[in-house]
């Protein structure tokens, strides 16, 4: 390895260290492991970083500020396509060719941690500054690996002008209200379908689970040691989700890649559930002034209002040659000011709660709803087998929505598959 | 040809339908690359761009290093193709015309490797390349593919069909094996070489997963990797950019094919039939 050796300059320490929001006391994790403390001082040497897609393209610009605060450090970012990024990581882990720092999808954490590839988060990083649901995505078996970098959550999008036409002036807050709103859209506002819901298939759990969590579901049982899909709460949510299809409010034959934006703009499907990236997408499709024709609302509550929290985490790999500086870079990216700056560059939503106080984010009322939902949004359990298990959930959901299969039987199938696959822990 | 005009007419009709079926996606890709994202996602879809724009291409070429990715792809594809043409025909010649101990076993070995799917050897191959220190280098993208079992098989079958008398004549005139190979065999292998060349070039040019995994920095990215990087996000795909990129990626292949078209068809028609 011809990498610049790490020299920790202890003397210059505090002066150059511009990290502000780092609490000294480590948040207490029950059984987990806390990473070794990181030496204080400026970061030095080369830090190699892998980041996917647009994040990879834009991160170098932000990293320049880190370099000027830490003159001895150089951040080398490689942008990786989302396609097959997972394969690239697993191959790199097998061959010990990982970078120092990487952006990692929240649902990959369990798998990579299980492979022993990730370095536990050191105590200097205060875990309580992040949204709770997002922080949970970094935890595997009680140990936190890395930090949530940015977050996203799912909300209900609806056309305000058409809702008015349908006689709805304030957004519904419960399940019954959501359904009658979608019905009214069809009856009074000429909508073909009341609300666009994914009719099973890959990733449909992300649309069903917000309802399950809102009904109070816990996807694990036995002290978080096993999957729990056939609980009464998940069943309730699945039955509710199915009723949209059986009552003709949602399209059973919706294509796998739905034409959400144009249908939303034309009013054919004036409601759907999706993440923050859809705001710019529908505004682009709708043209000027469309901004004022739609709004977002939280997932209506049953026991509570909850949703799915996604986004990406930042991890440091165990075989890094520049551990201290890598963690310093990660810690720097979690600084509220840096998070706000990153939002400006990438429109990625901050994972640090206090960053949401910044005028850049409070100015947008739609964003504020996302911020509110993030406080209660939840993530799936970080078992390494999650991706595998959830595939069977997606398949069963397709039967439930398209052919009207019995939700209870479908969930039982998912549960028995989940039991036979196991948590992998 | 002395078929009647009527059956010829039918032939043309069927061929036209087939050509349309094959060409339609390409035409759609080409036209789609001139549309805005909003138009691409419109229902019902449009065939002809309502408002043709070159924005997608402008965006594509404004991406840093696009020229470098093109260069990487070209170097890798050309060297891999040249290597396959040389080594596969050498091995094919030996297996077809020369007698030496272990020939049958060697041929069985080559055929055996044909049966192993690439995904099985993917990770071991990467570990090997990593241990040799070729990760993130162009040789790391080239070396593992310099000779392929399918190419060896193709060349052996073709060379086996050449008249052995030619070799004897060469030997009588005092030519060594190398000279026979270079002066007699290779010039006769034109169609097979063209086939092998275009197939190898295609495979190398379109290869995605291996370059993605081997490249550790953007300096060694090839076109398909860069294209996936730019056009596909975590939750959304920029279809306009994707189609423009695909058009740019496909063009060199079309040119290579047009250049070798006649020999290519000849090669497919003759290989392995004799």
Image (cartoon, rainbow, N blue to C red):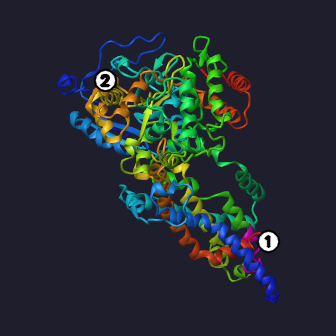
In the image, residue B100 above or below residue A100: below
Give the labeled residue for mark 2: A354
Question: Which quarter of the picture shows residue A297?
Answer: top left
> Which residue shows up at 56% across the image and 19% down it?
A215
Give the class, few, some or many, for how many residues have Cα within 10 Å of label 1's Cα (few <14, many ≥20).
Answer: few
State the SS at label 1.
loop
Give the labeled residue for mark 1: B273
The magenta span reads B157-166
The answer to whether residue A335 shows anywhere in this view is no
Q: CA distance from mark 2 to mark 1?
A: 74 Å
Residue B102 in the image: x percent, y percent? Answer: 76, 56
Quarter of the figure that contains the C terminus of chain A: top right
Residue B41 covered by magenta stretch: no
Q: Residue furthest bottom?
A: B2
The answer to whether residue A284 shows anywhere in this view is yes
Q: Main secondary structure of the magenta part?
A: helix
Q: Which mark, by number, is residue B97?
A: none
> Which residue shows up at 29% across the image and 35% down it?
A45
Residue A211 in the image: x percent, y percent? Answer: 56, 25
């Amino acid at each position: 390895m011809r990498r610049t050796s790490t020299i920790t300059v202890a003397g210059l320490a505090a002066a150059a260290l511009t990290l502000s929001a780092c609490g000294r006391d480590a948040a207490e994790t029950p059984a987990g492991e806390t990473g070794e403390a990181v030496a204080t001082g400026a970061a030095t040497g080369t830090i190699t970083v892998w980041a996917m897609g647009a994040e990879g393209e834009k991160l170098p610009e932000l990293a320049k500020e880190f370099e000027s605060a830490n003159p001895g450090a150089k951040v080398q970012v490689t942008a990786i396509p989302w396609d097959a990024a997972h394969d690239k990581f697993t191959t790199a882990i097998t061959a010990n060719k990982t970078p120092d720092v990487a952006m990692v999808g929240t649902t990959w954490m369990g798998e990579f941690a299980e492979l022993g590839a990730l370095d536990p988060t050191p105590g200097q990083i205060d875990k309580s500054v992040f949204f709770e649901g997002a922080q949970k995505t970094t935890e595997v078996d009680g140990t936190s690996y890395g930090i949530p970098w940015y977050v996203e959550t799912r909300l209900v999008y609806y056309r305000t002008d058409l809702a008015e036409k349908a006689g709805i002036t304030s957004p519904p807050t419960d399940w019954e209200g959501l359904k009658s709103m979608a019905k009214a859209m069809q009856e009074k506002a000429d909508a073909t379908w009341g609300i666009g819901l994914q009719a099973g298939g890959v990733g449909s759990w992300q649309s069903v689970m917000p309802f399950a969590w809102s009904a109070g579901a816990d996807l694990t049982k036995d002290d978080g040691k096993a999957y729990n899909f056939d609980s009464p709460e998940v069943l309730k949510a699945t039955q509710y989700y199915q009723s949209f299809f059986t009552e003709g409010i949602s399209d059973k034959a919706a294509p796998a890649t739905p034409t959400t934006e144009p249908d939303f703009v034309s009013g054919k499907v004036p409601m759907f559930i999706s993440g923050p990236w859809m705001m710019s997408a529908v505004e682009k499709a709708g043209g000027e002034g469309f901004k004022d024709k739609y709004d977002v609302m939280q997932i209506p509550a049953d026991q509570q209002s909850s949703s799915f929290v996604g986004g990406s985490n930042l991890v440091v790999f165990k075989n890094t040659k520049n551990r201290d500086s890598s963690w310093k870079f990660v810690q720097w990216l979690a600084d509220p000011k840096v998070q706000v700056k990153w939002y400006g560059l990438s429109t990625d939503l901050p994972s640090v709660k206090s960053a949401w106080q910044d005028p850049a984010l409070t100015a947008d009322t739609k964003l504020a709803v996302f911020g509110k939902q993030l406080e209660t949004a939840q993530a799936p359990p970080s078992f390494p087998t999650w991706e595998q298990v959830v595939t069977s959930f997606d398949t069963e959901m397709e039967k439930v929505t398209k052919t009207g299969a019995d939700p209870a039987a479908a969930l039982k199938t998912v549960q028995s598959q989940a039991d036979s696959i196991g948590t992998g822990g | 040809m002395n078929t009647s005009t009527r059956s010829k007419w039918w032939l043309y009709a069927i061929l036209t339908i087939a050509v349309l079926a094959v060409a339609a996606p390409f035409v759609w890709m080409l036209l789609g690359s001139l549309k805005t994202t909003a138009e691409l996602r419109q229902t019902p879809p449009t065939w002809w761009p309502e408002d043709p724009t070159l924005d997608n291409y402008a965006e594509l070429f404004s991406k840093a290093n696009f020229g470098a990715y093109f260069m990487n792809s070209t170097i890798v594809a050309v060297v891999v193709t040249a290597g396959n043409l040389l080594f596969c025909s050498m091995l094919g010649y030996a297996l077809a015309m020369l007698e030496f101990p272990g020939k049958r076993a060697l041929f069985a070995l080559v055929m055996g490797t044909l049966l192993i799917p690439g995904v099985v050897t993917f990770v071991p191959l990467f570990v090997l390349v990593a241990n040799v220190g070729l990760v993130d280098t162009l040789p790391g993208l080239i070396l593992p593919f310099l000779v392929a079992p399918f190419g060896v098989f193709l060349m052996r079958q073709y060379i086996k069909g050449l008249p052995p008398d030619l070799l004897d004549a060469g030997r009588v005139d005092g030519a060594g094996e190398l000279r026979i190979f270079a002066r007699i065999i290779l010039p006769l292998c034109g169609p097979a070489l063209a086939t092998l060349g275009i197939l190898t070039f295609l495979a190398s040019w379109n290869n995605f997963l291996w370059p993605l995994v081997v490249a550790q920095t953007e300096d060694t990215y090839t076109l398909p990797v860069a294209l996936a990087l730019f056009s596909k996000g975590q939750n959304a795909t920029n279809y306009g950019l994707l189609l423009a990129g695909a058009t740019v990626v496909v063009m060199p292949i079309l040119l290579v094919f047009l250049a070798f078209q006649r020999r290519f068809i000849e090669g497919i028609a003759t290989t392995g039939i004799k």
